[in-house]
Image: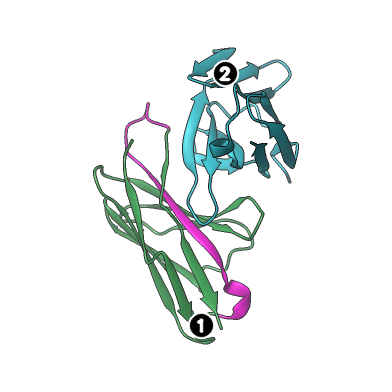
Amino acid sequence: GAVVSQHPSWVICKSGTSVKIECRSLDFQATTMFWYRQFPKQSLMLMATSNEGSKATYEQGVEKDKFLINHASLTLSTLTVTSAHPEDSSFYICSARGGSDTNTEAFFGQGTRLTVV
Amino acid sequence: QQQVKQSPQSLIVQKGGISIINCAYENTAFDYFPWYQQFPGKGPALLIAIRPDVSEKKEGRFTISFNKSAKQFSLHIMDSQPGDSATYFCAAVNTGGFKTIFGAGTRLFVKA
């Protein structure tokens, strides 16, 4: 299957600072990327959907000014957690899908563990 | 609103046994149903998927059964192995919007 790479795999930051997480599709062009958040022993909750070159669409309850998403190219999307606080500590996962109408499969990155201290 | 309901929450199976996980959905706009396997600290990996025009799909030890009229689908893992111990998520996709909605997850433990 296609490969989606996230970086970093884990990050620890101080409260009040910002953290950027990268999501790259390595062997296909990702017209749509998705960002999820997963708390321990819970399911994946969709945060936002981003299409290359346009603004991200955020799910209800997700603060768009806090979780900045940029999808500047067909292979890269970034999630920036601004002014991070301990409650933002979580496992963040991206997924990406290509542009074919018949291709509904989304490939997931390995996730980024964020710890805010 | 829980659009995809998954059960059981956890499951313990003896090695060689059959693991069965069930899911139900409400939105008839969903038209693609993948199952994902997730190990601790890793992202989910696609296991097997089915479309609603098919009632069953088998890949190796993994089988999806799909009941369109009941809006239910299930994953069967035959000859379960300790290496299958992981969290399994069913999901539903509306290919018009491409969002993947996940079930709550089932933590499977296969006893050696």
Measured in 3D between alpha carbons, the distance from the residue under mark 2 to the one under mark 1, in whole angstroms, is 44 Å
Mark 1, other Cα within 10 Å: few <14 / some 14–19 / many ≥20: some
**Quadrant in the rendering for residue A89:** bottom right
| Closer to us: A63 or A116 | A116
Residue depicted at 54% across the width and 86% down the height = A15
| Closer to us: B18 or B7 | B18
Mark 2, residue position? B52
At label 1, the amino acid type is: Ser
Instruction: Give the magenta part as a residue range.
Output: A85-104
**Rendered shade, chain B:** cyan
Whole-percent x, y for residue B11 in the image:
73, 37
Q: Quadrant of the C terminus of chain A?
A: bottom right
The label on residue A83 is 1
Whole-percent x, y for residue B57 in the image:
53, 16
Disc 1: which chain?
A
Mark 2, other Cα within 10 Å: few <14 / some 14–19 / many ≥20: some
Q: Is residue B7 above or below residue A31?
A: above
Q: Secondary structure at mark 2?
A: loop
Q: Is residue B26 left or right of residue B58?
A: right
Whole-percent x, y for residue B98 in the image:
48, 38
Q: Quadrant of the N terminus of chain A?
A: top left
Residue depicted at 49% across the width and 32% down the height = B47
Question: Marks 2 and 1: CB-CB under 8 Å?
Answer: no
At label 2, the amino acid type is: Pro
